[in-house]
Amino acid sequence: MFVILDKKVLNEQVTWLTLDAPFIARKVQPGQFVIIRIDEKGERIPLTVADFNAEKGTVSIVFQAVGFTTKKLAAMSVGDSILDCVGPLGCPTNFASPKKAIVIGGGVGCAIAYPQAKALKNMGVETTVITGFRNRDIVILEQEMRNASDSYYVTTDDGSYGEKGFVTDVLKRLIAAEKYDLVIAIGPVPMMKFVAETTRTYGIRTIVSLNPIMIDGTGMCGGCRVIVDGQTKFACVDGPDFDGHKVDFDSLMRRNGLYRNEEDHACRMEGAVNG
Ligand SMILES: Cc1cc2nc3c(=O)[nH]c(=O)nc-3n(C[C@H](O)[C@H](O)[C@H](O)COP(=O)(O)OP(=O)(O)OC[C@H]3O[C@@H](n4cnc5c(N)ncnc54)[C@H](O)[C@@H]3O)c2cc1C
Ligand code: FES
């Protein structure tokens, strides 16, 4: 059992939970994820490790309540326990040795981008963070991202906070003015696709973190297959980080919608059971 030690509600839909998970905390590295199961009947869902403390033995996850399991998780309290938390899974991010990097987080993708920015800053890399949200009410992790960067930009689609526009507007401006040797983009698939298209012409190494449907997380089921450089890869063992210039984003978008009817059904059934 994994006890919830801390809970923060970051916005109406996004929650931060810190779990007591000493074995994972000792091994995990930025870019890796865990698969959790709340109880015996629960489904398994992958969540990135947003923060960790090896000494305290804690692991933090930040998630958006989008469906059955994430809504149930968001309703849990400090002192409650989660049945399973398996990990760390996936490959750690291969930062190589950049001098100047840009880390981009879109919406809840900021939670996944946060450990990357923190790691780069700790490595002494000049780190710029760009975050993007629909509006000011859903801005998350601003102070954490400021602390993890040398320059921080926030955009909102409606201009209610920071700059009006998209993360790619700031990105285009920055890379046209100065030389960067790494961009990491994590967020909605269309955002990652447009970031990769923007950096391609400048030849800047671009890492994206993919989020296909995962079931076992160990390369056995094939559920998480993605096409990278024309080849089939399993995001759980070959990723979740990939070269953004080689990912087939359109096939990923199609596959992620495959179970929409079943997911809606699970939510409706839960609503019926709970009245
Ligand atoms: C490697 C990885 C890391 C992730 N990290 C985070 C994170 O840090 N924070 C966060 O908010 N979300 C993260 N996700 C997405 C998260 O796993 C889904 O939001 C979650 O599984 C939704 O489950 P649900 O039952 O609440 O919703 P459902 O109603 O079941 O699904 C809602 C949507 O979530 C996605 N989804 C559903 N089941 C899965 C599954 N088994 N695997 C992957 N995606 C699924 C689908 O796009 C689906 O349309 C990550 C996904 C992957 C693959
Ligand atoms: S989740 Fe089963 S192969 Fe990746």
Image (cartoon, rainbow, N blue to C red):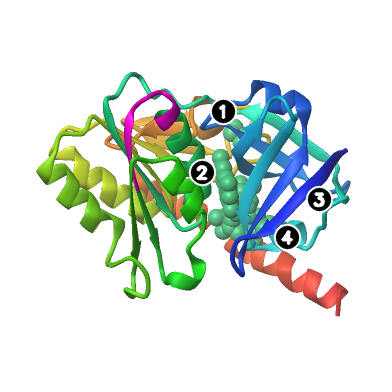
Q: How crowded is the residue under tag 3: few (<14 C-alpha within 10 Å), some, or many (20+)?
A: some
Q: How crowded is the residue under tag 4: few (<14 C-alpha within 10 Å), some, or many (20+)?
A: many
The residue wearing badge 1 is 90
Q: How crowded is the residue under tag 2: few (<14 C-alpha within 10 Å), some, or many (20+)?
A: many
Identify residue type, mark 4: Ala
Where's residue 126, x and y in %? 30, 32
Where's residue 87, x and y in %? 69, 29
Considering only vertical position in the picture, is 174 above or below 204?
A: below
Calculate the distance from the C-alpha at mark 2 to the C-alpha at mark 4. 18 Å
SS for dot 2: helix
The yes-or-no answer for disc 4 within 8 Å of ligand 1 is no
In the picture, the quarter occupied by the C terminus is bottom right
SS for dot 1: loop
The numbered mark, 2 or 1, whose residue comes first in the sequence reads: 1
The residue wearing badge 2 is 112
Calculate the distance from the C-alpha at mark 4 to the C-alpha at mark 3. 14 Å
The numbered mark, 3 or 1, whose residue comes first in the sequence reads: 3
Identify residue type, mark 3: Gly
Which mark's residue is nearer the viewer, 1 or 4? Answer: 4
Considering only vertical position in the picture, is 275 above or below 245?
A: below
In the picture, the quarter occupied by the N terminus is top right
Q: 271 and 97: which one is in front? A: 97
At 47% from the left and 55% from the top, the residue drawn is 142
Where's residue 257, x and y in %? 51, 58
Considering only vertical position in the picture, is 40 above or below 263?
A: above
Identify residue type, mark 2: Ile
The numbered mark, 2 or 4, whose residue comes first in the sequence reads: 4
Tell me which segment is drawn in magenta.
121-129
The residue wearing badge 3 is 42
SS for dot 4: helix
Q: 170 and 63: which one is in front? A: 170
The residue wearing badge 4 is 74
